[in-house]
Image: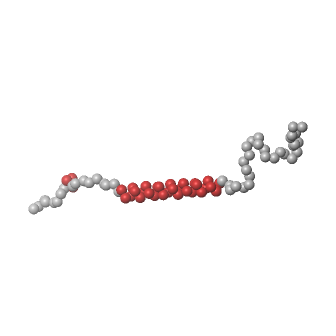
C-alpha cells in the first residue's frame, strides 16, 4: 500500500464558476431604482424652476395689450 494517495491533482474534475443570478438581479434592481430616483429628482427640480403663475401673461410681439402712456391715441376713423 505504499505510495497510494487519493486522486492526483492533475486528475481532479475542474468545474466552471457558475453565474450568480441573484447578485445580477439585485444589481439590475438597484440600478433601476437609482434611475427612477434620479428621474423623480429631475422632475421635481424642473417643477421648482418653473415659477408659479405670477400674474404676468405672455403677449405675442406686436400685440401690446395697452398703448404706452405718452403715445397718441389712434384716430377712430375721423
Q: Residue furthest top?
A: 77
Viewer-nearest residue: 76 or 30? 76
Residue at figure coordinates x 66%, y 53% from the top left:
50
Q: Residue furthest front?
A: 78
Residue at figure coordinates x 38%, y 58% from the top left:
23
Viewer-nearest residue: 15 or 48? 48
Question: Horizontal and vertical percent for residue 46?
Answer: 61, 53
Seen in the image, is 25 located left or right of residue 39?
Answer: left
Viewer-nearest residue: 18 or 22? 22
Residue at figure coordinates x 10%, y 62% from the top left:
1
Seen in the image, is 4 located left or right of residue 41?
Answer: left
Question: Horizontal and vertical percent for residue 4?
Answer: 13, 60
Q: Quadrant of the C terminus?
A: top right
Position of residue 63 relative to residue 30, above or below, is above
Question: Horizontal and vertical percent for residue 12?
Answer: 21, 55
Residue at figure coordinates x 86%, y 47% from the top left:
69
Viewer-nearest residue: 69 or 51? 69
Q: Quadrant of residue 19?
A: bottom left
Seen in the image, is 63 located left or right of residue 19?
Answer: right
Question: Horizontal and vertical percent for residue 15?
Answer: 26, 54
Seen in the image, is 36 located left or right of residue 64?
Answer: left
Amino acid at each position: 500500500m505504499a505510495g497510494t494517495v487519493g486522486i492526483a491533482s492533475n486528475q481532479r474534475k475542474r468545474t466552471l464558476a457558475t453565474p450568480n443570478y441573484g447578485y445580477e438581479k439585485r444589481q439590475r434592481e438597484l440600478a433601476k431604482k437609482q434611475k427612477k430616483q434620479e428621474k423623480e429628482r429631475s422632475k421635481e427640480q424642473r417643477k421648482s424652476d418653473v415659477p408659479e403663475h405670477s400674474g404676468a401673461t405672455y403677449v405675442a410681439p406686436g400685440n401690446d395689450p395697452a398703448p404706452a402712456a405718452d403715445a397718441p391715441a389712434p384716430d377712430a376713423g375721423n
